[in-house]
Image (spheres, grey):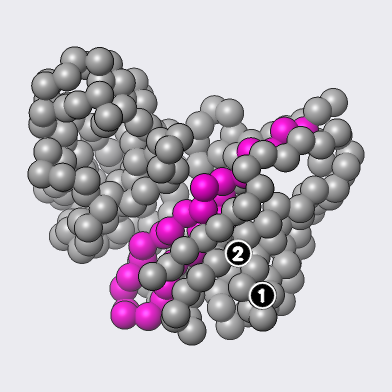
Amino acid sequence: DAGVIQSPRHEVTEMGQEVTLRCKPISGHDYLFWYRQTMMRGLELLIYFNNNVPIDDSGMPEDRFSAKMPNASFSTLKIQPSEPRDSAVYFCASSLGGVAHNEQFFGPGTRLTVL
Amino acid sequence: AQKVTQAQTEISVVEKEDVTLDCVYETRDTTYYLFWYKQPPSGELVFLIRRNSFDEQNEISGRYSWNFQKSTSSFNFTITASQVVDSAVYFCALSEGSGGSNYKLTFGKGTLLTVNP
């Protein structure tokens, strides 16, 4: 079975440009998570969805960031306008919900560089 | 608020040595879940183990073992007879279980383990 798929794997853009990161969760998983990893702040949860509905977006740094999940097999994280401090690795993860707090399966990440 | 502390930023060992990675957590919930993830140089995050707060039994999986002690709020990870392939960043994480569907994972800062041949 395919794991979590993210695209692009690498993105280099200039400050002020719009950036869209994409994620396809594992089929059948009903939770989707977006994380950001930087050297300074480590791994941070940005937002997560349950059955395509955003549940907690308290980790989204500011209004420049937005995330959508139009259907069970696709999610986007958009940054508009991008800034150099947004440079990081962005991970998408999915899990099968339930009482047991199942493990999250992570995608390979998108390395974003904003010049 | 939940918090995870991995005090060891970097550890370097020689192959075949045993190594323990420390994890201390803070939570006000009585129900919670602890995780360890591995991030090898390739960058992906790999799930290693999940433990709930009601199960303090230690676990062994091959060369890996985990020691969960609620009394000290610790969930330490030991690799026995380390190998070069164990070189990675290891993350401890916590998810609080109350509130029905709170699946937020809080990660520690990670410990970079380097196993030298």
**Label 2: how many residues lie within 10 Å, few (<14), some (14-19) or many (20+)?**
many
Tell me if I can see residue A3 in this picture: no
The CA span between labels 1 and 2 is 8 Å
Look at the image and give the residue range highlighted in magenta. B91-115
- Do we see residue B105 in this rendering? yes
Q: On the rendered structure, is A71 left or right of B10? A: left
Q: Is residue A78 left or right of residue B112?
A: left
**Residue behind mark 1:** B72
Q: Secondary structure at mark 2?
A: strand
Residue at 25% x, 24% y is A84
| Residue A35: % across, % down | 34, 45
- Compared to A21, does A106 lie above or below? below
Inspect the magenta stretch and tell me whether residue B114 lies in it: yes
Q: In the figure, B117 relative to A92: above or below?
A: above
- The quadrant in which residue B56 appears is bottom right
What kind of residue is marked 2? Val
Residue A115 image point, x, y percent? 25, 15
The structure residue drawn at horizontal position 66% and vertical position 48%, both measured from the top left corner, is B8
Q: Chain of mark 1?
A: B
Mark 1 is surrounded, within 10 Å at the Cα level, by few (under 14), some (14 to 19) or many (20 or more) other residues, namely few
In front of the other: B44 or A96 = B44
The answer to which of marks 1 and 2 sits earlier in the sequence is 2
Image mark 2: chain: B
Name the residue tied to disc 2. Answer: B24
Q: Are marks 1 and 2 in contact (CB under 8 Å)?
A: yes
Which x, y percent locates residue B104? 36, 62
Q: Is residue B28 above or below residue A56?
A: below
In the rendered view of the protein, which quadrant contains the N terminus of chain B? bottom left
Q: Nearer the viewer, residue B113 or B6?
A: B6
Which element type, helix, strand or loop, lies under badge 1? helix
